[in-house]
Amino acid sequence: MNFKTVIAFSTGIAILLIAFSGCGESVPKDEEIAAVTRQIAGDFMEEMKNELTTALSDTVAGTVGAINVCSEKAPEISARYSSLPGVTVKRTSKRLRNPNNAPDEYEARILDTLESRPAFASQDHYEWEIMGDQKSFRYVSAIKVGSPCLKCHGNPEKMEEEVKEAIAAKYENDQATGFGLDEFRGLLSVTLEWPEGKAVYDSIKAGL
Ligand code: HEC
């Protein structure tokens, strides 16, 4: 092999290597990952809504009974979604009922932005967060107050006495009352670690 052939040969190998490594690690477009996290968020919200609607329609247990559903089912559903490899799903807010739902740094930043720019809440948001060698796709969408929510998050003067007592007994520093209809209540937050969450991404993407 003369010098020129060696150069041409090694350039060829280098191009092949780059092409193959590119294949193995190619990250989908942000919009594609957002569509998957949006699906996860939608499924989660639907499940929460169904649990709540069922609980609130139980006339024997009433709203007080539904508090247990919220305090037990909500963390349970979050934990189930978050057991998917590379996935974390949670609800968070600036005015918390359960301190375990406190925002992390990214969520706190979005909550601050929402406070100063309410229009920001009309759409969902996503971006990559890089922490050391950990890369995560962060997706959030706004949670708004609907009329059934007011029973437990509305004006305390209009809430049932037993409901207020039951909430106070469970959550000693509750800040999550006094919301009005359609008001911004908090965020639904989905984190997809990459590449840990790739298998989940692939299987949801295939069904979209
Ligand atoms: C029956 C009472 C009840 C109703 C109705 C209710 N919630 Fe809640 N909510 C709770 C309880 C209890 C918690 C604390 C759950 C926990 O321990 O994680 C909570 C927590 C939350 C949180 C998590 C943040 C935090 O403050 O801890 C959000 C967000 C939320 N509720 C939104 C809503 C929305 C939106 C609705 C209406 C669709 C609603 N809730 C209806 C009782 C209720």
Image: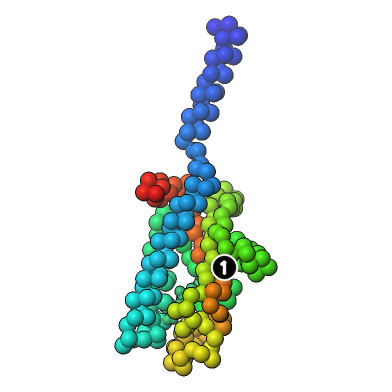
Name which residue type carries label 1.
Pro
- Using the rendered image of the protein, determine whether residue 23 is visible from the camera's viewpoint: yes
Which residue extends farthest top?
Answer: 2
Which residue is located at x 36 percent, y 73 percent? 51
Question: Within 8 Å of ligand 1, the CB of disc 1?
Answer: no
Residue occupying the point 53% across, 28% down = 18
Q: Which residue is mark 1?
A: 103
Q: Is residue 107 above or below residue 172?
A: above
Circle 1 residues within 10 Å: few <14, some 14–19, many ≥20: many
Q: Horizontal and vertical percent for residue 93?
A: 56, 71
The x, y position of residue 58, in whole percent, is 32, 82
Q: Is residue 5 depicted above or below 15 in this figure?
A: above
The quadrant of the image that shows the N terminus is top right
Front one among 126 and 167: 126
- In the picture, measured across the screen, residue 108 lies left or right of residue 170, that is right
Task: Give the colour scheme of this rendering.
Answer: rainbow
Q: How many numbered discs, if any?
A: 1
Residue shown at the point (47%, 51%) measured from the top left: 35
Compared to 200, does 46 lie above or below? below
Q: Quadrant of residue 71?
A: bottom left
Residue at x 43%, y 61% (from the top left corner)? 42
Q: Residue furthest bottom?
A: 161
Give how far across and how far down residue 185 sits, in percent: 54, 73
Q: Quadrant of residue 56?
A: bottom left
Q: Position of residue 101 (x, y in %)?
A: 51, 71
Of residues 193 and 190, the one nearer the viewer is 190
Can the viewer see residue 108?
A: no
The answer to whether residue 138 is above or below residue 65 is above
Comparing 114 with 106, the one in front is: 114
Q: Secondary structure at mark 1?
A: loop
